[in-house]
Image (cartoon, rainbow, N blue to C red):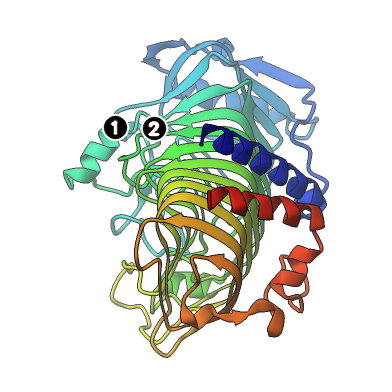
Amino acid sequence: MGRSASVFQALLVFLITIIETQWSSVSGMYCADMASTVYRPHSVTITEFGAVGDGVTLNTKAFQNAIFYLNSFADKGGAQLFVPAGRWLTGGFSLISHLTLSLDKDAVIIGSPHSSDWPVIDPLPSYGHGRELPGGRHQSLIFGSHLTDVIITGANGTIDGQGAIWWDWFHNNTLNYTRPHLVELMYSTNVVISNLTFKNSPFWNIHPVYCSQVIVEHVTILAPLNSPNTDGINPDSSTNVCISHCYVRNGDDVIVIKSGWDEYGISFAQPSSNISISNITGETGGGAGIAIGSEMSGGISEVRAEGLRIVNSLHGIRIKTAPGRGGYVRNVYIANVSMHNVSMAIRINGNYGEHPDNNYDRNALPIISNITIQNVVGVDVGVAGILEGIEGDNFSSICISNVSLSVQSRHPWNCSLIQGYSNSVTPESCEQLRTDCEETSICYDGGSSLAVGSRASIHNKPSANILLNSLLQLVSL
């Protein structure tokens, strides 16, 4: 048994390596012409502005003054703000264009435990009010708006939000405003976040919203598995986003794509599209390895996710929406996924909870179509899938192929109000998906054309298919 597990792991790594090579050119085109590092001719250290790295002194003014000074170099090639080893306590501060914020490997930027050190700002227009409470919301620890050419990086330095006090306020219903993220950039282009560890965010960790050309790579995100709403990486109404080589262990979705909430998202009408996600390892106490929604009212499309390892989690793959959301989720391709000890492998939910207020249009039904999930292996899985559409709004072209799950439940699938296709699925998929992909049209293949059946798509990758078959045989041992 031990030998089979070792061979299984080796084959899985080899398989994912092959797929990564085959798909790298497509993922790269979403973030073409972006460099993860840029030479800055001007550089200062935060200590030059009076900062003290003792973990006690509040350094908000030092960060603000340093960035104000560096703004004079924005049209001279930009500048770098270097944070050396130490524990640098601060409230929220804002970045500028043409800036690199760089952390030493032993540097820790620490969020203040006092809510007054986190400014309150207006709600996002695509949400209408704070995500948790009416009115404004606390600004993120590191914030920026209407920027270009921004890099937040380091030699695996750390940004720690000290979220425990915020989680207590949340559980005790004593929040006055929606909790802050660790990093939020709005209306910005050419953004890179890399080579850092993010810990204990009060709310979501990394939130690019209304952005384009965003790279998030080689980051580690950590929070207790029971911490509330500590989503990892949340591209929101953003385009051309590439997320790769990340490890996330948190209390909510590892990676989740959003685009606005009910009537506010419909009115703002800024979709998320061209999202590439690859080489992600995730563990979550209350969320999914990869999720879409439930705030998707501006539309979400052209999503490619591959090379995902999801362990000890509630859900593997999840799409969340509800009547009143409007919008659409379409052209989503998720492939080459391994799961271990996951309660539910695949979840599509057409009746997922909250609304910002009572003014939403109950007849605004979301369109969910062209969703392809293939090449998935899972062991110690509770339930294979629950896939539920909306009455009068069947979700269509849900395509599942080359999926092998070792499932504990006697009722592995539960499907209603959906239509789709399947091929080589173990345990056998639900009746609504039993039309063979090869015999009908049209499963989204992750490219610009929809006119490719799932099995044909797999046959274009013969080496991967041979290895996948070997994996499936090992799982059945």
Residue at image location 57% in from the left, 38% down from the top: 4
Left of 189 or right of it: where is 221? left
Q: Which residue, given by chain and number where applicable, does mark 1 sit on?
A: 164
Left of 357 or right of it: where is 243? right
Residue at image location 48% in from the left, 69% down from the top: 265
Pointers 1 and 2 in contact (CB under 8 A)? yes
Specify the amino acid type for callout 1: Ala
Specify the amino acid type for callout 2: Asn
Asked if one can make out residue 333 in the rendered structure from this viewpoint, the answer is yes
Which of these two is toward me, 29 or 59? 29
Asked if one can make out residue 186 in the rendered structure from this viewpoint, the answer is no
- What is the C-alpha distance between the residues marked 1 and 2? 7 Å
Residue 215: image x %, image y %? 67, 43
Where disc 2 sits, the SS reads: loop
Where disc 1 sits, the SS reads: helix
Which quadrant would residue 460 be assigned to in this image? bottom right
Q: Is residue 227 above or below residue 457?
A: above
Left of 261 or right of it: where is 238? right
